[in-house]
Image (cartoon, helix red, strand yellow):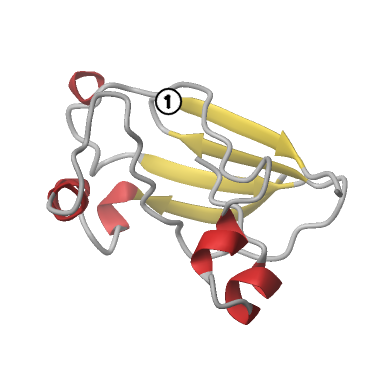
Amino acid sequence: MNDVSQRNLQKGDTSGWFRGKCLDSFGPIGPAVLRAEDCPDPQSLKIETTLNGEIVQSSSTAEMIFPVAQLIAFVSRMMTLEEGDIVSTGTPSGVGPLAEGDRVEIAIEGIGILSNRVISE
């Protein structure tokens, strides 16, 4: 998932994170969604993001602040998770502003590459 944020809305609006992350076309997912049985160790996947071909993020799920199992346990105490639900875990350091025409590509080991072009409203 490409965790897109509109920072001026996220920081300057009482709705905060909700409005800053839920605009149309924010949060694209792909190129595939794996079932748990297809990813036996979600804590050992390389993640790399490029912006216009330049690496801006390079990390691993091993570096996550909270392990996947802990996140699922936390979320499931507040709501029922069902097959097909997606829990987004945030992003490694290296985020920055985007401009119209930019291409963002997020590669996750064993899953593939999600590629998006930035367009204005």
**In this rendering, position of residue 73 left or right of residue 57:** left
Residue 30: horizontal and vertical position, in percent? 52, 27
Q: Which residue is rendered at x = 31% and y = 48% of the image?
A: 61
Q: Which residue is drawn at 69% across and 74% down?
A: 8
| Residue 98 sits above or below residue 13 on the image | above
Nearer to the camera, 56 or 118:
118
Q: How many marks do you count on the picture?
A: 1
Q: Residue at coordinates 49% horizontally, 53% vertically from top-left?
A: 58
Residue 15 versus residue 26: which sits nearer the camera?
A: 15
96 or 46: nearer the eye?
96
Q: Nearer the viewer, residue 66 or 22?
A: 22
Tell me: residue 119, above or below residue 95: above
Specify the amino acid type for callout 1: Ile
> x%, y% of residue 12?
64, 80
Residue 11 location, x and y as percent? Answer: 60, 78
Q: Is residue 108 left or right of residue 78?
A: right
Q: Which residue is drawn at 12% across and 49% down?
A: 73
Q: What kind of element bears circle 1?
A: loop
| Residue on which disc 1 sits | 111
In the image, taking residue 116 as reference, residue 58 lies left or right, namely left
Q: Look at the picture and state if 49 lies above or below 94.
A: above
